[in-house]
Amino acid sequence: MWNSQKAQSLLARANVLLQSDPTHRDPSIWENSEDFCPERFSHGRKTPPMSYIPFGGGPRACIGAAFGQAEERIGIVVRLLQTFASKPLNADKIHPHRGATLSRTPGGWM
Ligand code: HEM
């Protein structure tokens, strides 16, 4: 068992595996640590360094972290579109809008 209070020796070329789950559920770091609570990551909320490490950390952290999270967001949107039918509530008020890119007039509600 690892003792964080005491210096430890490692054999040269030893593999060290850090399990992220205990850190992600550590009640000394997270309020209601066992709860599913995405709000804890809401904008403006800071987490202590190395307290949330699904992509590892330090110089060998995952290089695909941003890509992986973008994929997850797309997956959620796809799932919502597959699960729910949607239609615009004010289709007559939505028109093409030429800005820096072509978009639609703001204010489209689904
Ligand atoms: C949700 C998706 C992903 C998760 C949870 C994940 C997680 C991780 C973790 C925990 C590590 C080890 C970091 C460490 O040793 O500290 C890692 C390394 C790595 N990941 Fe990911 N990863 C994801 C997606 C991706 C994607 C999409 C790519 C490439 C497109 C990728 C490429 C890599 C590479 C190349 C490394 C090795 C980095 C190194 O050793 O320098 N990962 N990833």
Image (cartoon, rainbow, N blue to C red):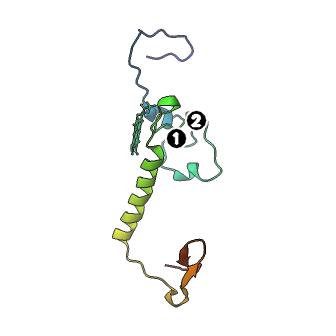
Quarter of the displayed picture in which ligand 1 can be seen = top left
**Does the closest atom of ligand 1 sit within 8 Å of the Cβ of label 1?**
no
The image position of residue 77, as x and y in percent, is 42, 64
What is the tally of numbered marks visible in this picture? 2
- Residue 50 showing in the rendered view: yes
Q: Is residue 23 left or right of residue 98?
A: left
For disc 2, the neighbor class at 10 Å (few under 14, some 14 to 19, many from 20) is some
Query: Which of the 4 image quarters holds residue 103?
Result: bottom right
For mark 1, give the secondary structure. Answer: loop
Q: Nearer the viewer, residue 103 or 106?
A: 103
Q: Nearer the viewer, residue 107 or 19?
A: 107
**Does the closest atom of ligand 1 sit within 8 Å of the Cβ of label 2?**
no
CB under 8 Å between discs 2 and 1? yes
- Residue 25 showing in the rendered view: no
Q: In the picture shown, does residue 20 fall above or below 70?
A: above
Name the residue located 47 percent from the left edge and 30 percent from the top edge: 60
Query: Which of the 4 image quarters holds residue 79?
Result: bottom left
Residue flagged by tag 1: what amino acid is it?
Ser
The image position of residue 110, as x and y in percent, is 49, 78
The residue pinned by badge 2 equals: 29
Name the residue located 56 percent from the left edge and 72 percent from the top edge: 101
Q: Find the residue positioned furthest to the bottom.
A: 92
Q: Which mark is residue 33?
A: 1
CA separation in Å, label 2 and label 1: 8 Å
For mark 2, give the secondary structure. Answer: loop
The image position of residue 47, as x and y in percent, is 60, 40
